[in-house]
Amino acid sequence: QVQLVESGGGLVQPGRSLRLSCTASGSIFRFNRMGWYRQAPGQQRELAATITRDGTTNYGDSVAGRFTISRDNVKNTVYLQMNSLKPEDTAVYLCGAVEGVTNLRTYWGQGTQVTVSS
C-alpha cells in the first residue's frame, strides 16, 4: 500500500515563501514521476510541477519561475519550494506519484491547504 503524506501548508502573506513536503511510505525510485497538483474551490485540478526518476522537471505556466520541485531519494521525499506567493496560489496542493510501464498506476496524498492572504 503506497502512502503519500504532504506537509508544510498554511497561511502566508503575499510575496512570502513556503515549502511543501511529500513523503512516501517506501522508496520513491519505484515511481516514474512524482509531482504537485493544486485545486482551488470550483476550479479544475492543475499542474504545479513534476519531477521524473532521473530528475527532469516540468512546471505549470502559472508557477514557472517562482516554484521549484526537488527530490531527496534518501528521505523518500519530494519538495515544492514556493516563492513570491500570490493570492491566486491559494489552493489545496496534492502530491501524486505514477508507477508502472504498460499499466500505469497513480497514487495521491490527502492534500495540504495553502492560503495566501494579507
Image (cartoon, rainbow, N blue to C red):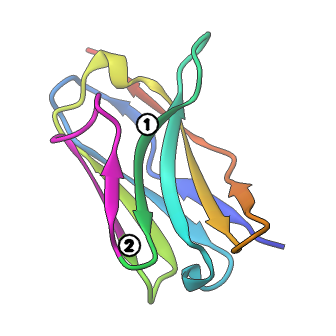
**65 is higher (above) or lower (below) than 15:** below
Q: Is residue 75 left or right of residue 110?
A: left
In the image, farthest residue toward the right: 1
Range of magenta residues: 55-70
Q: Label 2: state its secondary structure.
A: strand
Judging by the rendered image, the residue that carries numbered circle 1 is: 10
Tell me which amino acid carries mark 2.
Answer: Arg
Tell me which amino acid carries mark 1.
Answer: Gly
> Which quadrant would the C terminus be assigned to in this image?
top left
Front residue of 118/60: it is: 60
**86 is higher (above) or lower (below) than 72:** above
**73 is higher (above) or lower (below) than 71:** below
User: Which circle, 2 or 1, is nearer the viewer?
Assistant: 2
Give the Cα separation between the discs numbered 2 and 1: 21 Å
Identify the residue at horizontal 27%, vertical 35% (top origin). Answer: 63
* Residue 56, percent from left and from top: 33, 67
* Residue 36, percent from left and from top: 48, 48
Identify the residue at horizontal 52%, vertical 62% (top origin). Answer: 34
In the image, farthest residue toward the front: 102
- Residue 47: within the magenta? no
Identify the residue at horizontal 72%, vertical 57% (top origin). Answer: 106
* Residue 28, percent from left and from top: 56, 79
Residue 90 is marked as none
> Mark 2 or mark 1: which comes first in sequence?
1
Q: Label 1: state its secondary structure.
A: strand
Judging by the rendered image, the residue that carries numbered circle 2 is: 71
* Residue 41, percent from left and from top: 59, 14
> Which quadrant would the N terminus be assigned to in this image?
bottom right
Circle 2 Cα neighbour tier, 10 Å, few/some/many (<14 / 14–19 / ≥20)? many
Identify the residue at horizontal 46%, vertical 38% (top origin). Answer: 47
Does the CB distance between marks 2 and 1 fall below 8 Å?
Answer: no
Q: Is residue 102 left or right of residue 24?
A: right
